[in-house]
Every structure is written in structure tokens, then in C-alpha cells.
Amino acid sequence: NAAEKGGYAHFMLKEMHEQPKAVADTLNPRLRDGEIVIEELGMSDDEIRQIQKIYIVACGSAYHTGVTAKYVFEGLARIPVEVDLASEFRYRNPIFGENTLVIVVSQSGETADSLAALREAKANGVRVLGIVNVVGSSIAREADNVMYTWAGPEIAVATTKAYSTQLTAQYLLALKFAQARGLLNAEEIACMVSDLKRLPEQISLLLSHKENVQKFANRYLAAEHVFFIGRGIDYAISLEGSLKLKEISYIHSEAYAAGELKHGTISLIEDGRLVVAVLTQPSLYRKTISNIVEVKSRGAFVMAVTNVGNTEVEKVADYVIYIPETNPYFANSLAVIPLQLFGYYVSIGKGLDVDKPRNLAKSVTVE
Ligand code: G6P
């Protein structure tokens, strides 16, 4: 009912607006005097240093946070990470070593495949860390250690605030691992922590521009296919942007690693086709800009999400949304906001049931 939605038209809109608080609530208890303290990890720095391999296992949007976290862990902590869909993981006979850590990410803590993956890892004697939102859920109870995301109850089927807190938790872990492994000094950690602390207000700022996204979304209600492109972390952001759009708007969408476009998907680009390009990683700007030029020359209409100051994108894209400045490793937390809003406004613009899209469940407890 209306009261439960706190004055918002839909749970999804309410939950998008709860993201600044959810991110802050997930962050703050783990920061002490500029240091990262994750007691519930239950691992000393010595034990962290012994970890040689991480598997991140999850489904849906939680899996997408893992795709991002892989870049962050590998980039900052230099530990090899494999990200697996939980429904694939246990059927591929994964290689578990003594120094392997399995991280299972789940909002509900009840997703059947994620729980089964956890059990598979534990049966092989591997330590499992759960990143879970629902306190006391099955994954939280069965994991060796659990790091809670403090998003609060999430009602809309399409996740927003839980996704944002899952990213936050994994940034903290990656920084902790990097520090324990001697790859970041106190000053570097402090600098990145101050970027993390700015995320909530930056997310608020992006949410405050929602009418602009709505106006743009209203022009694309009749779209049949939409493509999201990006490289590196921008590819991970594209995966989530595409999922958000398709699950609530019923528009076919695909996320593509921008460099793969010319291996197939570019044949689907024609006059007026919407392509959403994500460019938050400065080292990859030039490469993705050239992909924008390629789709533009085949008639695509390009909406770009990029960092403030990267005005060069305006020369090639038709519509540009800027995100505030942050460390590139954390850019997903900002760039995803306009993409969530885009999916939301296309869905309600089409008059669909945005909180309860057809055929989908909030928590998939069957295989
Ligand atoms: C469903 C939900 C998604 C979610 C996925 C995994 O498909 O609609 O929003 O990402 O399950 O759920 P979990 O509870 O394990 O995060």
C-alpha cells in the first residue's frame, strides 16, 4: 500500500532513493579512523595473505557485482578471481585448493543455486564467506563467515539498493586484502576510503536528476532492441544496465564487451537503434569512443554515461549523462544509478507493473 512505499509511486523508486543510506550503512560500521575493519571476516592479515584464489559465486544482479569485484580484487589486491554463475559452478567440477576462498553473494540468502554452490564448496573443505542481506537466511547460516549488507528489506523484484550494497561490501574486502598483502599503504587506503565515503552524496546527486532520465526514457518506450556496451568495469556496469531494462520493460537488450561488437552484434545496428555506452574507465575512453563512432556510422542513437569532464564524448554521442568524480574502481556505484532510472522510467512509461514483472520472482528458491 501507499504507506509502505513511503510516498513513492513504487517500491523500486523508493528503494533507489534508499541507496545513499544503504551504502553508508554498509560502509560506516567497517570504517574506524580511516581504517577498514571487517571483524566478521574472521581472518587475520596472515590468513588473508595465504589466500591464492577467490571464486565469487552468485546469480542475477549479485553475479554482476561479482563481475565488477573481480576487476577490483585483481587490480588492487592482485589475487586471481573467477566469477561463476551459481547454476554453473557446481556442475563444472571447480578446482579447489587449500588456499581458495569462495565468496557467495546473495540478497535473499535463499537462492537455491547459490546455496547449493556454497554446500559444494564446504563439502570440499573450502572456506565460504557469504555476502548476504537477509539476516539469518540459509546462506548466512551455512557460510563460515558472513558479511552483511545493510540494505534493509528489498521488495521490488528488480534489485537496486541490495546491488549497491553488494558492491560496497566487495570494495571494502578488496581494499582490506590489498592492504594485508602490502599493496596499498595507509595513505592510499585513506584516499580510497574518502572516495567511498563520498559515494552516498554522489548517488543522491544522480538521483536528483531523475527527470532528465525520464524525459529521455519516454522517447524509447517503443524500442525493440537496446544494446549496452563498455569495456572492463564498464562492461560489468553494462550487464546490470541491460538486465534492469529487460526485466522490467520487456524490451530485448544485450550487454556487449565493446570490443566484441564487431564479432557479431554490430550486424543488428540499424537506423535509430539505441546503444547505451558506458565510459567510466579513463584508460579505456579512447577505445570505447571508437566503438561509439562505429555504431553511429551505422545509424545508432547513442546515450553515453561517462565521468564529469570527459566532454569529448559529446562530439560522438547523442545524449550524455555525467557521473561525479570518484576512483575508477568505484565508478559502477555511480554509473548504475542512471541506468536503474532508465529501466524504471521505460517500464512505468509503458504502463507495466514495475515492482512485479511477469514471470520473475524476488528470490528463486528452486533450481
Ligand atoms: C532474482 C532476483 C534478482 C537477484 C537474483 C539473485 O533473479 O530477481 O534481483 O539478483 O534473484 O538473488 P539473490 O537473493 O541470491 O541475490
Image (cartoon, rainbow, N blue to C red):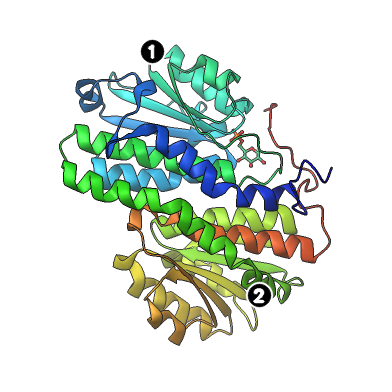
Q: Residues within 10 Å of mark 1 (few under 14, many from 20)?
A: few
| Residue indicated by mark 2 | 216
State if disc 1 and disc 2 touch (CB < 8 Å): no
On the image, the x and y values in percent for residue 142 come to 52, 15
User: Which quarter of the image is occupied by the C terminus?
Assistant: top right
Instruction: Write the residue at 44% across / 15% down.
Output: 122
Nearer the viewer's eye, disc 2 or disc 1?
2
On the image, the x and y values in percent for residue 334 come to 47, 58
Q: Which mark is residue 314?
A: none
On the image, the x and y values in percent for residue 248 come to 72, 54
SS of the residue under disc 2: helix
The quadrant in which residue 268 appears is: bottom right
On screen, residue 243 versus residue 150, left or right, reads right
Count of marks placed on residues = 2
| Residue indicated by mark 1 | 125
User: Which quarter of the image is occupied by the N terminus?
Assistant: top right
**Does the beta carbon of the residue at mark 1 sit less than 8 Å from ligand 1?**
no
SS of the residue under disc 1: loop
The quadrant in which residue 152 appears is: top right
Q: Nearer the viewer, residue 295 or 139?
A: 139
On the image, the x and y values in percent for residue 127 come to 38, 18
The quadrant in which residue 310 appears is: bottom left
Q: Nearer the viewer, residue 287 or 5?
A: 5
Instruction: Write the residue at 39% across / 44% down.
Output: 69
Q: Amino acid at mark 2?
A: Phe
Q: Is residue 232 above or below residue 26?
A: below
Label 2 – label 1 distance at C-alpha: 51 Å
Q: Amino acid at mark 1?
A: Gly
Instruction: Write the residue at 43% across / 34% down.
Output: 56
